[in-house]
């Protein structure tokens, strides 16, 4: 998926310091900091089909961030968010522990345990190596970082001198990303059953290892991941139709998690006033694709970008590509539904419509939809992108513009925005997020549901 990565302001501010035991040493080393934000957000979009303007999302939200430190040995952080309002015509009342973890240090080694958000990769727009942190692309927020979801993990890190470190992360519990399914209108006969996710058994966990090298002008990282991809696939379960009218009666689907192996690398090099970044990853499902329509082909994904940071403007421009290995053309149209016309076409070709033939046809269509969703219908994909930020009036006004063009699918992402800071801690933002694509493309399906303009007022403390 084309997911934008934004800058999240650091809003944690120390409000008080205290000692748990009262002695001088603890009063110096034991610290607490409390900060947070309160914001109101409204998204206005059009209803798919009718085109009527409506409040796609409208909510108030409060977030609290608490950080604590116990001397030189341990620290902890938690972020709690409260949200109430309406989203996609449904009431929303949510209390979420976004992150909650404890850090412990022991010489050159450190350990982090709890609910984490720790994305991989140096890319600004695309991160082929990031298989750890799940995402929710349906979230209605002007801050792209809000798409990241926390996951429960144990993380260990060892510093090998001042310029090298190794980090290992173990995810014993599966946390999936949110598929772009719920907001999209579907025929009434399409039902999603309980998902097939791994259980809490220790051998069902995932792990990742990354090695970082910092040598002043060059930052290099290598990555290895073995475990469940955070994007689940959509699997076919069963199909029923009226044999007299050939009208579909029931199509049962389910989300299915699958294991992959991934090896990747990224590199960041300064070139005068520019920064050059590259990132690439190979991934392959560990199971056979035979009769597993939800499994993707192995692929090689890569991105390269240039960034220039100035006093009045920041600019990032780059290219993202994919090569689908073991590629085979799709034999079916990508769809999560079936109609009379498909069955009549088979009859006209002399095909006998028994249960095996019908299920095979539906399974092929679901498999093609997975390929559409994962951008694997073509053997090669080429995408260009540009993200710019301009600053005015001593950085009180910020103008942003993001443009992404998938040359292979002719899909476009357009995200202009403007923000104003009338006072310290207060930020007023407005903008638009649009996904556009030709008929039968992924953006043609999800764009009418997600396209919207927004207004946000946020106070940090």
Image: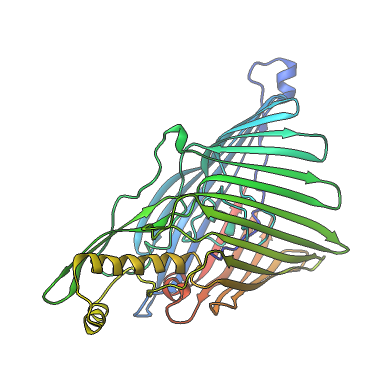
In the image, residue 42 sits, relative to residue 434, either above or below, namely: above
Q: Residue at x 74, y 38 (%)?
A: 165
The total of numbered circles placed on residues is 0
Q: Residue furthest left?
A: 244
Determine whether, in the image, residue 124 is placed left or right of residue 269: left
Determine whether, in the image, residue 337 is placed left or right of residue 460: left
Q: How is the image coloured?
A: rainbow
Q: Residue furthest bottom?
A: 348
Residue 115 rendering spot, x and y as whole percentages: 53, 38
Q: Residue at x 86, y 64 (%)?
A: 273
- Note whether residue 330 is visible: yes
Determine whether, in the image, residue 295 is placed left or right of residue 416: left
Residue 41 rendering spot, x and y as whole percentages: 50, 61
In the image, residue 459 sits, relative to residue 55, either above or below, namely: above
In the image, residue 141 sits, relative to residue 17, either above or below, namely: below
Q: Quadrant of residue 393?
A: bottom right
Q: Nearer the viewer, residue 218 or 404?
A: 218
Q: Residue furthest right?
A: 272
Q: Nearer the viewer, residue 61 or 268?
A: 268
- Note whether residue 403 is visible: no
């Amino acid at each position: 998926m084309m997911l934008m990565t934004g800058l999240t302001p650091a809003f944690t501010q120390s409000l008080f310091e205290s000692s748990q035991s009262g002695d001088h040493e603890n009063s110096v080393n034991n610290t607490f900091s409390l900060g947070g934000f309160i914001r109101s957000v409204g998204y206005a979009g059009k209803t798919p089909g009718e085109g009527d303007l409506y409040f796609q999302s409208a909510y108030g939200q409060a977030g609290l961030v608490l950080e604590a430190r116990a001397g030189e040995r341990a620290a902890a952080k938690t972020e709690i968010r409260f949200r109430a309002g309406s989203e996609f015509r449904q009431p929303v009342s949510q209390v979420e522990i976004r992150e909650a973890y404890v850090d412990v240090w022991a010489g050159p080694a450190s350990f982090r345990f709890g609910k984490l958000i720790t994305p991989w990769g140096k890319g600004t727009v695309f991160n082929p190596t990031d298989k750890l942190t799940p995402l929710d692309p349906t979230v209605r927020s002007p801050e792209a970082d809000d798409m990241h979801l926390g996951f429960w993990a144990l993380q260990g890190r060892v510093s090998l001198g001042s310029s090298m470190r190794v980090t290992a992360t173990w995810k014993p519990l599966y946390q999936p990303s949110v598929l772009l399914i719920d907001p999209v209108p579907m025929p009434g006969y399409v039902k999603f059953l309980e998902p097939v996710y791994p259980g809490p058994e220790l051998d069902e966990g995932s792990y990742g290892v990354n090695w970082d090298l910092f040598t002043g002008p060059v930052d290099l990282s290598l990555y290895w991941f073995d475990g469940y991809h955070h994007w689940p696939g959509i699997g076919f379960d069963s199909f029923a139709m009226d044999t007299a009218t050939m009208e579909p009666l029931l199509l049962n689907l389910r989300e299915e998690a699958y294991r992959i192996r991934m090896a990747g690398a990224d590199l960041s090099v300064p070139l005068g006033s520019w920064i050059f970044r590259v990132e690439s990853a190979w991934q392959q499902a560990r199971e056979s694709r035979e009769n597993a329509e939800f499994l993707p082909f192995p692929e090689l994904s890569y991105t390269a970008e240039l960034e220039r940071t100035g006093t009045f403007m920041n600019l990032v421009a780059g290219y993202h590509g994919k090569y689908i290995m073991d590629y085979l053309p799709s034999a079916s149209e990508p769809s999560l539904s079936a109609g009379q016309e498909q069955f009549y076409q088979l009859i006209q070709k002399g095909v006998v419509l028994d249960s095996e033939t019908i299920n095979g046809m539906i399974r092929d269509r679901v498999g093609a939809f997975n390929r559409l969703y994962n951008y694997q219908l073509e053997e090669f994909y080429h995408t260009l992108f540009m993200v710019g930020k301009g600053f005015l009036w001593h950085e009180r006004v910020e103008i942003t513009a993001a443009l992404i063009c998938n040359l292979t699918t002719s899909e476009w992402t357009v995200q202009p925005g403007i923000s104003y800071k009338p006072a310290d801690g207060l930020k007023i933002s407005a903008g638009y997020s649009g996904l556009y694509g030709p008929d039968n493309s992924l953006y043609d399906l999800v764009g009418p549901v997600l396209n919207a303009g927004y207004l946000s007022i946020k106070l940090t403390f």
